[in-house]
Image (spheres, rainbow, N blue to C red):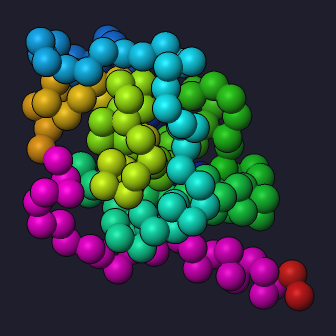
Amino acid sequence: MILKADIPEIREWTESLWGKNSPYLNFNRLVDSPPILKKEERIETRMPNKVLKDKLIERDGHNCAFCGIPVIRAEIRKVIKGVYPNALKWERQNINQHSAFQAMWLQYDHLLPHSRGGNNDLDNLVITCAPCNFGRMQFTLEEVSLLNPLKRERRKTEWDGLERIKKTVVLHRI
């Protein structure tokens, strides 16, 4: 099943969403938008800590806050790759990554991008898929005409991000 899910059309769709050449990225640089800061000007580390990541998953579940696609944490992907190394390819280059796992890769996204001064407060972070996160790049929600997902009602699903697999693998190793 893992091999069958590595579908070229998924890769094409994913890669069409991210990067400056995306036909879907339409942004308006707004006069009052925060500037892109140099790395030394940014206020804190870019990634949230484990406690905050756990709070985000508890609040948002395992679905992208923007598009709703089910997502899987990198840690779970690594467990699956350990069990099925020939089925789940994951190397450095996008072309050498499993297309479905790439599309469903859970990200911790800053609503106000870190590069624009965004912090790691819970009210500035959401769970997203890689395409939504990388597709928006350093642009603000307003610049790409997106609504703040924290200000609209979202339906939490039963999808657990395949977290159950980690428990199963541990049990089978005992």
Q: Position of residue 42 (x, y in %)?
A: 49, 26
Residue bounds of the magenta highlight: 148-172
Taking the spot 66% from the left edge, 50% from the top edge, the residue there is: 88
- Spot occupied by residue 2 in the image (x, y as percentages of width and height): 58, 57
User: Please, which residue is most extreme toward the right here?
Assistant: 174
The verdict on residue 169 being magenta is yes
Is residue 87 located in the magenta-colored stretch of the structure? no
Q: Is residue 112 visible?
A: yes
Seen from the viewer's position, the closer of residues 131 and 144 is 144
Q: Work out whether 2 lies above or below 142.
A: below
**Residue 133 vertical placement versus 166 (above, below):** above
Relative vertical location of residue 174 with respect to residue 2 in this rendering, above or below:
below
Report the side of 94 relative to 151 (left or right).
right
Residue at 40% over, 52% down:
121
Q: Is residue 10 visible?
A: no
Q: Nearer the viewer, residue 143 or 44?
A: 44
Q: Quadrant of the C terminus?
A: bottom right
Quarter holding the N terminus is: bottom right
> Residue visible at 12% across and 44% down?
147
Quarter of image, res 57? bottom left
Name the quadrant containing residue 33: top left
* Residue 101, percent from left and from top: 52, 49
Q: Is residue 171 above or below residue 42?
A: below
* Residue plotted at (33% across, 48% down): 124
